[in-house]
Amino acid sequence: MDTHVQKYEAAIVDRAATLLGEGKLVAVPTETVYGLAADASSDLAVAKIFAAKERPNFNPLIIHVSDMEMAEKYAVFSGFAKKLASAFWPGPLTLVLPRKADGQISHLVSAGLDTIGIRCPAAEPAQEILRAFGRPFAAPSANRSGGISPTAAAHVLSSLGDRVDLIVDAGDCSVGVESTILKVTDEIVELLRPGGLALEDIKAVVGNVDARASSGPAIQAPGMMASHYAPNASMTLNLSAAPEGSAFLGFGAIERHEPQDRNLSRAGDLVEAAANLFKFLHEMDTLAVHIAVAPIPMKGLGLAINDRLQRAAAPKE
Ligand code: TXA
Ligand code: MG
């Protein structure tokens, strides 16, 4: 592989932190997807993220922190927000909270909003790099805007190439879909994006969650584009059999066995299916011009999987 793809190890953690300090872009593995990281306090560094991704500027970014102490420097935590953070951090949960005025985070990160998206990732490479860097990095998924999210270093390399200064390779992401995003206003918890943390688990901690904002593929939160995570191939969802000439993405017992076909989880396990989703879409996109997808149950991580599939299948702008 390319010299700017480096296996995760101690020396690479220091190199990543140094590059971030110089305002460079580093692809960092997290448990959800690979992030395209830049110093969140530098307008110039954050602007490089938008340029590399060719991402529309109105889309705010998430900042990543090593722990609660770092998080509280940049956002105001209500009692409910604290409860959620202590239940699920580190992990695949992003909280959108009121932004602290004196927090020294680039306004480009939150696209001028008075809220900020903040996440404490669990994966060791992300944690180690954050600790070595000592302050937050902003990181969207490390792919060109609208493309399939990267769950392996090779995906980052093929999408962004040398637009990124270092790609830290720690193998496949364990969760495989982006974090669940909750907006917390005092005691109101709103689901902005289903993701790697199941809604059922969140409800067990805070009771009611308002899921209206995330329903359907329309633009609901800033940057929630209808066509997103999209392969070049066209897609049709909820099919129990695949049209001839297409590739079939199966689930459970609904599957086919052509070379271009995959099964998200033969056992019908939604956690395994989430981990396989983007990897299989990447592979199938090179093998077919149409992808047919089996029905995926709307429970647990099935909400996030169906959300990403709907966006991937939406007509492209
Ligand atoms: O798992 C993840 O969340 C990955 C890894 C790298 O951490 N990151 C990720 O970032 O998915 P990104 O930029 O692809 O998605 C962030 C989403 C966007 O849809 C954006 O609109 C929303 O978070 N967001 C960020 N800040 C927000 C805010 N202040 N208000 C509303 N939505 C916000
Ligand atoms: Mg993304």
Image (cartoon, rainbow, N blue to C red):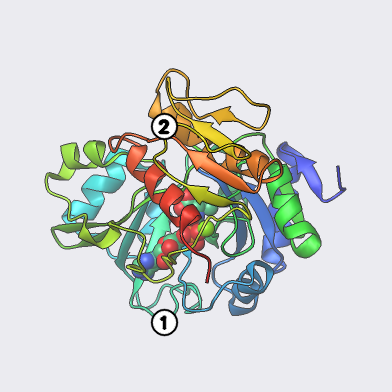
Outermost residue to the bottom = 112
Going by the image, does 302 lie left or right of 134? Answer: left
Say if disc 1 is inside 8 Å of ligand 1.
Answer: no
Residue 65 in view in this figure: no
Amino acid bearing label 1: Gly
Going by the image, does 3 lie left or right of 136? Answer: right
Amino acid bearing label 2: Ser
Q: In front of the other: label 1 or label 2?
A: 2
Q: Where's residue 235, x and y in %? A: 52, 49
Q: Quadrant of the N terminus?
A: top right
Name above or below for residue 109 compared with residue 95: below
Q: Earlier in the sequence, mark 1 or mark 2?
A: 1
Give the residue number, with chain letter if any, for mark 2: 240
| Towards the viewer: 53 or 293 | 293
Please give the name of the residue rendered at 15% of the width and 45% of the height, measured from the top-left corner.
206
Q: Where's residue 33, x and y in %? A: 55, 46
| Towards the viewer: 244 or 267 | 244
| Towards the viewer: 317 or 202 | 317
Distance (Cα) linking label 1 and label 2: 45 Å
Going by the image, does 195 lie left or right of 80? Answer: right
Question: Callout 1: few (<14), some (14-19), or many (20+) C-alpha neighbours within 10 Å?
Answer: few
Q: Quadrant of residue 154?
A: top right
Name above or below for residue 118 compared with residue 128: below
Please give the name of the residue rendered at 68% of the width and 68% of the height, measured from the top-left corner.
52
Please give the name of the residue rendered at 45% of the width and 48% of the height, measured from the top-left corner.
309
Q: Where's residue 220, x and y in %? A: 32, 68
Residue 268 in view in this figure: yes
What is the number of the mark on residue 112?
A: 1
| Towards the viewer: 70 or 296 | 296
Under tag 2, what secondary structure? loop
Q: Where's residue 242, x and y in %? A: 51, 35
